[in-house]
Amino acid sequence: MSGKKIYFADKPINQIVAEIRALKGTEITQLDLSMNAFHKRSVDELTAVLGALIETGIISLDLSLNEFYQRSVDELTAVLDTLKKTRINSLDLSLNDLYKFGAALASLLSFLKETEVTHLNLSRNCLGGKLDVGQTSPLSALKETGITHLNLSRNILGSSSNRILASLFGSLKGTSVTHLDLCMNNLGQKSAAQLATLFSSLKETEVTHLDLGRNNLGDKSAKELKIIFDAIPVNIVSVGLYYSELKTMGQSQRQAIQNRFDHADNIILYDEKHINLEPSLRRNDARAYRTFGFKISAPSLLNRCAFFIAQKRIFPRETCQAKLPSELNHYINSFRSTLA
């Protein structure tokens, strides 16, 4: 996807709106409006800015680092409600100190209903340790929304009590969330028994994939890891971990994880940039999986050609690509959908 960054700076609002409207008819689908100090603009101005998205092809919007906490819930809701008229399906609200809204955060997130948003990034909002027992879970606002991918990474959730976290995760019942990112939350500071109880609260949710990278789980013994991973409910069919994490673990530790997730498709490995390894496409990635005992075939020539074409976009879709074999075209289109 092609992207564009727009800084508000001291520009008049009509200039900002014009810049966004100029994206209509272009191939730009990602818009970065981060670091624009939303509190320095009026509600009407911000509504006009987001309203300008309606006639564009923008589907991914970054609103991170905009100091949301300096506006009231009512003001932000009035602004964000405008997204209901757009095609935005990926929304980044990270680094906005959303924890400062407390119990009102659930009310703020209610704007997501009637939007097309499926991917929501709430990472780095210091939610851990700021949730109170008895407080309405902010995730309860995701019911009746189309959110399938939820990013809660880097929220120091490990500092919250198990009772609070179990309530938080339990509130995902009745939502459409299938992918939950809990990376870098220092969950490893909790005992194996606590983590087992915590993960079991995801039972009866729609969650099928759980990202657990960089939570110091490598500090746990093989026995502890077995308790933790065996407690992950059967609806969760895959977990995400960093390759470097598994590499530094002992064989018995890895085996404790692989006893629960025993196929390559069940463990998604990431590199240091949090990009998943693609064993069916890259020889080095396939080799990395084989290091841990997974049976991985070498990437086929067909797969590698299709991936190269999809990544480089070297053929116009309606001309040269139309002359390629149908099987190759099928793979190219499949890879393009994952790279989009």
Image: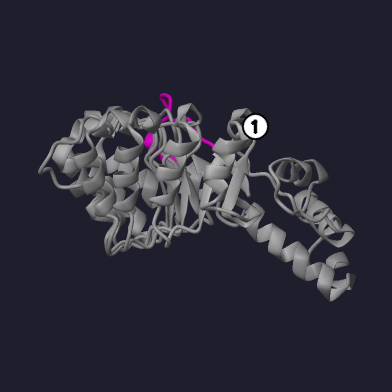
The correct choice, above or below, for 300 with respect to 323 in the image is: above
Spot the residue most to the top: 10
- Which portion, as a residue range, is magenta? 4-16
Which quarter of the rendering shows the C terminus? bottom right
The residue that appears at 68% across and 44% down in the rendered structure is 277
The image quadrant that residue 142 belongs to is: bottom left
Q: Residue 66 in the image: x percent, y percent?
A: 36, 31
Q: Residue 221 in the image: x percent, y percent?
A: 47, 31
The residue that appears at 53% across and 45% down in the rendered structure is 257
The correct choice, above or below, for 205 with respect to 152 in the image is: below
Helix, strand or loop status at disc 1: helix
**Left or right side of 123 for 250:** right
The residue that disc 1 covers is: 247
The residue that appears at 54% across and 57% down in the rendered structure is 57
The correct choice, above or below, for 131 with respect to 26 in the image is: above
The amino acid at mark 1 is Lys
